[in-house]
Image (cartoon, helix red, strand yellow):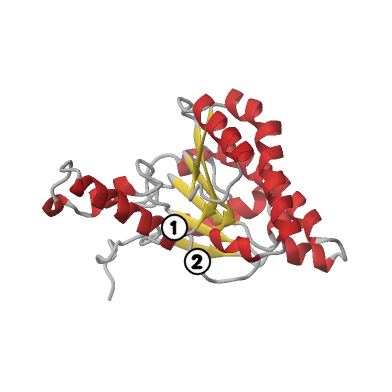
């Protein structure tokens, strides 16, 4: 299968330009269990896969990359695993922030800030402020994120604007709702990849993924690399996106 190049991805490619890639990074625990290792080592290797994927996105010229890092449902996991995941996020920011900033990557973190400790929130704010004006790649990290929760919070923001007299309720449409979401200003994902063989959204970007193309891979996330990304993109580029309309090619 021919592999995509940045020249194929950046411009419109037969109506299938790839501006925004979203990934559900699944399978860290099963990767570790398969090897007789603790789940924490699976999560640690998952961070290495994130680094590989960010580098690949930069190489391929993808403007937006959103990764599902910690879901609002993950709080039901054992306390020690939650603490480890929080620590991983802190270490990722501390270790990678300077390199990402130098690479002209803008970091944006979406999700509910409730229950996230103040030290981590301060690191998130530092990262987003430092990289705010970077333009090569926007890395959106969905952390303590749930799609339904995001929609409820967006509705609350719009309701507050209406109550304050700042917004006419008759003017609320899909564009206004987009603005109120955590992802306001970010284009909807064109391609959504999920690893580990599962075939569901798991409360990820529910509103934004209305017309996304899905690619589901059997590969566990810690094994994910540029070759898997390029294969998924090649599959995406071979599809025709119709957005509810008719195919551009005539059919019998």
Work out whether 244 lies above or below 82: below
Q: Position of residue 187 (x, y in %)?
A: 37, 46
Image position, residue 79 (x, y; %):
72, 59
> Which mark identifies residue 117?
none
Left or right for 87, reference 8: right
Identify the residue at horizontal 78%, vertical 61% (top origin): 39
Image quadrant assignment for residue 213: bottom left
Q: Residue at x 63, y 30 (%)?
A: 97
Indicate the secondary structure of the residue bearing disc 2: loop
251 or 40: nearer the viewer: 40
Which labelled disc corresponds to residue 205?
1
Residue sitting nearer the eye, 205 or 213: 205
Q: Position of residue 26 (x, y in %)?
A: 64, 61
Q: Residues within 10 Å of mark 1 (few under 14, many from 20)?
A: many
Query: On the rendered image, what quadrant is the C terminus found in?
Result: bottom left
78 left or right of 25 in image: right
Q: Nearer the viewer, residue 23 or 171?
A: 171
- Estimate the x, y position of residue 185 in percent, counting from the top left: 35, 40
Q: Residue 56's image quarter?
A: top right
Q: CA distance from mark 1 to mark 2?
A: 8 Å
Quadrant occupied by the N terminus: bottom right
What's the residue at 59%, 39% (across, down)?
118
Badge 2 local density, few (<14 within 10 Å), some, or many (20+)? Answer: some
Q: Is residue 181 above or below residue 220?
A: above
Position of 49 relative to 101 (above/below): below
Q: Which mark is residue 201?
A: 2
The reply to whether dot 1 and dot 2 touch (C-beta < 8 Å) is yes
């Amino acid at each position: 299968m021919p592999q995509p190049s940045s020249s194929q991805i950046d411009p419109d490619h037969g109506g299938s330009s790839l501006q925004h890639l979203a990934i559900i990074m699944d399978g860290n625990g099963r990767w570790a269990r398969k090897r007789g290792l603790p789940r924490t080592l699976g999560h640690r290797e998952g961070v290495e896969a994130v680094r590989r994927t960010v580098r690949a996105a930069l190489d391929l010229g993808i403007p937006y990359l959103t990764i599902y890092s910690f879901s609002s449902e993950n709080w039901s996991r054992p306390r020690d695993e939650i603490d480890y995941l929080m620590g991983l996020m802190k270490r990722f920011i501390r270790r990678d922030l300077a390199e990402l900033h130098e690479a002209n990557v803008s970091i944006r973190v979406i999700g509910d800030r409730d229950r996230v400790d103040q030290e981590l929130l301060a690191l998130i704010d530092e990262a987003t402020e430092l990289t705010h004006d970077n333009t090569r790649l926007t890395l959106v990290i969905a952390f303590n994120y749930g799609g339904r929760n995001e929609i409820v919070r967006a509705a609350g923001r719009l309701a507050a604007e209406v109550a304050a007299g700042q917004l006419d309720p008759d003017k609320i449409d899909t564009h206004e709702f987009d603005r109120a979401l955590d992802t306001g200003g970010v284009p909807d994902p064109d391609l959504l990849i999920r690893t580990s063989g599962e075939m569901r959204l798991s409360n990820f970007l529910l509103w934004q993924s209305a017309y996304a193309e899905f690619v589901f891979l059997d590969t566990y996330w810690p094994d994910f690399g540029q070759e898997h990304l390029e294969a998924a993109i090649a599959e995406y580029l071979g599809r025709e996106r119709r957005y509810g309309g008719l195919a551009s090619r005539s059919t019998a």
